[in-house]
Amino acid sequence: MLFMINSNKMFFMFILFFSTLISISSNSWLGCWIGLEINLLSFIPLISNSNNLLNSEASLKYFLTQTIASINFLFSILLKLIFLKNFFENFFSIMINSSLLMKMGSAPFHFWFPNITEGLSWFNCFILMTWQKISPMILLSYYLNMNFIMIIMIFNSIIGVIGSFNQNSIRKLLAFSSINNLAWMLASISISNSIWNLFFIMYSLLNMIMCSIFYIINIFYINQMYNFNLNFFIKFSIMINFLSLGGLPPFLGFFSKWIVINFLINNNWLLITFFFIMMSLIMIFVYIRIIYSSFLFFNFKMKWFKINIKNKHFHFINFFSFISLIGMIFSTFFFI
């Protein structure tokens, strides 16, 4: 999972992290654009694989969509430099916001995001759903158009839920879950950067646990959870982390959403708060339906599909489940 052997991959990983720092620490829009371009050019070698057509297709799609977003971003910057007056200020902010939202895979520019995750490994999925959102998100906080962003929040929460229904691929399910959580991220960053930091760290932790478990047991589709003779403890840990990702109390994932809800209510965003809670309930229903079916099929044993997990990998699953359970215990103290 980690690139311990391949030095080229390690080099591109370093450039990927370094380019994000360039973007968020730059004092000009052009410097931010350069950081985003370096980030794009360092991520493509990580996801492309000549032996796998799906990876090559995903890297090409990612390159094309990110290039369109970068051109739009650069065009917006140049227009802003030419027209220094505030007459077109609203237009510029919408253009810059839309190009950054397209880079994140936000609705309604989300069509590339689930298709690309389908062709990636679990490690690359984790990077795409977490690290690749940092620089566009922070740049977005510099130049927010609140009326536009509130519409985008509603779009994200609706499309994230609708796309999750009748989804067989776990990678696509997590991609639509990421789109749904993006609405919460946009709400948190429009209130405060520190709240966004907390929400993003919690979301990244849960995503890391989910991607690591699915990588260890080598599962990509939901029907594999039904057919395979999985260990009960593995299914239990998947259940905990799914419910935590959905934001069900008293799990760890609810803690960050609870803080965002508090601040939204304090700022009188009551309609959006109600909308977010309703959409989260539907997402939890989708997760519970998957978990319930997989537990029902627990005794459906086929010996030729038996999974043998090495002891060192099983320790990882135990560790991740321990984090989730401890987080659930600690979060209950905050709710009290």
Image (cartoon, rainbow, N blue to C red):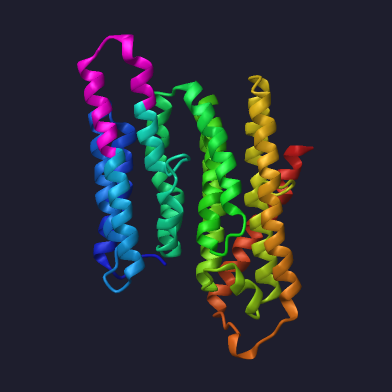
Quarter of the figure with the N terminus: bottom left
Residue located 24% across and 63% down the image: 8
Q: Nearer the viewer, residue 329 or 104?
A: 104
Q: Is residue 2 visible?
A: yes
Q: Residue 81 appears in which quarter of the rendering?
A: top left
Where is residue 42 drawn, in percent x and y?
Answer: 26, 52
Q: Which residue lies most toward the right here?
A: 336
- 89 inside magenta stretch: yes
- 110 inside magenta stretch: no
Q: Residue 289 appears in which quarter of the rendering?
A: bottom right
Secondary structure mostly seen in the magenta stretch: helix
Residue located 65% across and 81% down the image: 229
Magenta residues span 70-94
Q: In the drawing, does residue 26 fall left or right of residue 126? A: left
Quarter of the figure with the C terminus: top right
Q: Which residue lies most toward the bottom here?
A: 304
Where is residue 294 drawn, in percent x and y?
Answer: 69, 70
Q: Is residue 230 visible?
A: no
* Above or below 242: residue 282: above
Where is residue 104 drawn, in percent x and y?
Answer: 41, 42
* Above or below 149: residue 278: below
Residue located 46% across and 39% down the image: 108
Q: In the drawing, does residue 207 fall left or right of residue 299? A: left
Q: Nearer the viewer, residue 9 or 163?
A: 163
Residue located 62% across and 32% down the image: 260
Count of marks, rendered view: 0
